[in-house]
Amino acid sequence: MSFGDPNNPYGAPQGQQGYGQPGYGQPQQPGYGYPAAPPVGGYAPQAPTSMPGTVSTARILLWIIVGFQVLGTALFSFAAVAAKKADEEPAFEQLKDTPPGQLWALAALALVWGVWAAFLAAKFSSGGNGLRVTTLVFGILTAIIAVFPFTLAGIIHLVFGILIAVFAGNSNGKAWFNRPRY
């Protein structure tokens, strides 16, 4: 018995060459076999073209922190000047025990922190993954430093620092800062 014999129980039935396989020299019919491969880059995730909402919120929070830092710099500078006059004026009696140098150092720290926040916020539209990591560090350090002076301004900085770190570190932030720039 040969393969072409119609009485062969192991051969293909009459009129068919095999399940899903074309015969020798016959073209394969559409619909059989594996599907066509997708085009190159067809399933790659698309880079965002506009800033996601959470990233934009982190940028706005950074600008709000800049405003707080400008206000803090002004208040610490005023307090440093008033501390020098604490012996002469009874209104500044509470600042008598605080050295003016310490208040000037706090004013300088507030100014540097505000400049850092302004730099980060200004670079959000063009920055890469390094800016994202720096923003994460800024948010975490802001939250940690805000715990120490447990005041209303400290609580606001704590919440803003946590939100900035979360919004810059989530998948939307990663997609935004790792997008191609050409």
Image (cartoon, rainbow, N blue to C red):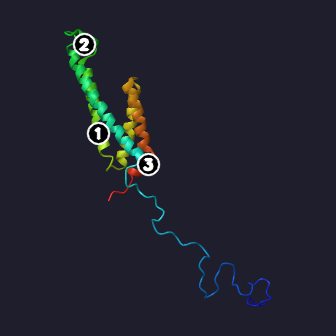
- Look at 29% across and 31% down and name the residue there: 69
Real-space Cα separation, disc 1 to disc 2, in angstroms: 32 Å
- Look at 23% across and 16% down and name the residue there: 83
Please name the residue that numbered disc 1 is placed on: 118
Please, is residue 112 above or below residue 52 in the view? above
Real-space Cα separation, disc 1 to disc 3, in angstroms: 21 Å
Crowd tier of the residue under label 2, counting other residues whose Cα lies within 10 Å: few below 14, some 14–19, many 20 or above: some
Quadrant housing the C terminus: bottom left
Instruction: Give how far across and how far down residue 147 sits, in percent.
Output: 41, 27
Please name the residue that numbered disc 2 is placed on: 92
Instruction: Give how far across and how far down residue 126 sits, in percent.
Output: 31, 50
Please, is residue 38 above or below residue 128 in the view? below
Q: Amino acid at mark 3?
A: Asn
Q: Quadrant of residue 41?
A: bottom left
Q: Amino acid at mark 2?
A: Phe
Please, is residue 114 above or below residue 98 in the view? below
> Mark 3 or mark 2: which comes first in sequence?
2
Please name the residue that numbered disc 3 is placed on: 172
Real-space Cα separation, disc 3 to disc 2, in angstroms: 49 Å
- Look at 80% across and 84% down and name the residue there: 9
Q: Quadrant of residue 2?
A: bottom right
Crowd tier of the residue under label 1, counting other residues whose Cα lies within 10 Å: few below 14, some 14–19, many 20 or above: some
Between 132 and 93, the one nearer to me in the picture = 93
